[in-house]
Image (cartoon, rainbow, N blue to C red):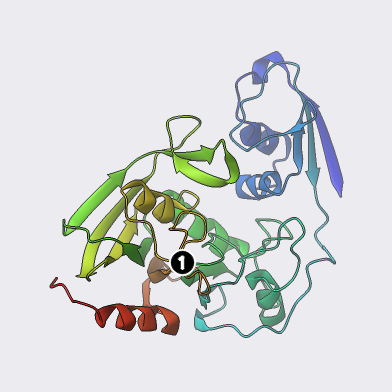
Amino acid sequence: METIKIIVEDKENGMRIDKLLLAKNPGTSRTQIQGYIQDGNLCVNGKTQKANYKVRTGDDVIFTIPDSVNMDILPQNIPLEIVYEDQDVIVINKPSGMIVHPSAGIYQDTLVNALLYHCKDLSGINGVNRPGIVHRIDKDTSGLLMVAKNDLAHQSLSLQLQNKTVDRLYYALVHGVIEHNYGKIDAPIGRDPNDRQAMKVTDINAKSAVTNFRVVERYKNYTLVECQLETGRTHQIRVHMQYIGHPVVGDPKYGRRKDDTSFGQYLHAKVLGFEHPRTHEHLLFDSDLPEPFIKKIEEIKGEEYWLK
C-alpha cells in the first residue's frame, strides 16, 4: 500500500482532485485514480471526498493506492451466463439478486468473485475490489453487462460510455397505464437528503439525467416499456419512472409498498452494443427476459388486455 500526501499550492487552487492526483502520479491512469477514490482511498482535511472535488490552497490531501492483491476478494465457483467472450471482453447476463462487485462488508457471492474464478486476466484499472468492471447494474436488476479483461479494453469501453456511444436498452414493467407511446424524462438526479442510500429528482447537488422510453405493451394496470439511457446515473430508470408516477413493479426502494419483491424489480438490461476495443467491430447483444419476468407478464395478460 502506498500513501501519498499533498499540500495544495496556490497554482493548483480550483483543480479537480482527480486531475491533481493524475499530475502527481503520471504512471497511473485517471480511471484508476477515480476507482481508488470511489473505494474511499482519498481524504481531504480529514474527510473523504469524491473525484470531482475542487481543491483549495492549503488543503491537506492523503491519497492511498492499495496493494495489487486483496486476499479478502477470493474467486468463487459461481455459475455465469456468458453471452460472449474473447481475449479482451466478456459479456455477462447477470441474474437479479447478484451484486456486481464487493464493497464494505460484502466480500463474497458477487459477480467479481465469480469472474475471478472464471478468468485469470481482468483489467486492474478500477482497483482490486472491482477488477474488469466498466459499468454496473443494480443488484436486483438483471441483464447484460460488459467486463474488460485488460486495461486496453477497459479504457476503450470506458471512453465509449463517456462519449455515450454504447447501446443500452432496458425493459421495465411499471405500474399504471402510460398513455403516450413515447416519452423523454429530463430531470436531474441527486442524493436523497432523507435517505443516503436513495436517489431522487432534485436540483440540489444533482447531475443531469435523461431517460427516453417507448411503450411496448399496455395492460389493465401496468405498462411494459423500453428505456434508453442518455446518462447513467445511479438508479436512474427506477427514480425517473417513480417521478412520473409509474414506478417499476417490485422495486423495494422506489416501488409501491404492497409489491411482491421476492424477484426484485422487474427491470432488465436487454440490449447492449459497443465497439470492440481491438477489432473495432460493432457488437450487439440481445437477451431474453428472465423467466420470473415472463411469468409476471403472462399473469398480467390474464387480466383485461389493452392494445398497443
The answer to whether any part of residue 93 appears in the image is yes
Q: Dot 1, how many residues are within 10 Å of its Cα: few (below 14), some (14-19), or many (20+)?
A: many
Residue 3, above or below 181 = above
Q: How many marks?
A: 1
Residue 114 as seen in the image, left or right of residue 282? right
Residue appearing at x 65%, y 56% in the figure: 125
x and y percentages locating residue 197 in the rendered image:
60, 48
Secondary structure at badge 1 equals loop
Q: Nearer the viewer, residue 177 or 271?
A: 177
Considering every residue shown, the one lying at the far front of the view is 258
Across and down, in percent, residue 33 comes to 67, 45
Q: Is residue 294 above or below residue 223?
A: below
Residue 27, percent from left and from top:
71, 46
At label 1, which amino acid type do we have? Answer: Gln
Find residue 181 and report its horizontal and vertical position in percent: 16, 59
Above or below, 276 against 292 in this view is above
Of residues 66 and 277, the one drawn nearer to the viewer in this rendering: 66
Q: Is residue 287 visible?
A: no
On the rendered structure, is 282 left or right of 70?
left
Q: Quadrant of the C terminus?
A: bottom left
Relative to residue 118, is residue 277 drawn left or right?
left
- The residue to which callout 1 is attached is 265
Q: Residue at x 38, y 51 (%)?
A: 242
Please tell me which residue is depicted at 27% across the width and 57% down the height of the picture.
213
Where is residue 305, by image quadrant? bottom left
For residue 123, what is the image quadrant?
bottom right
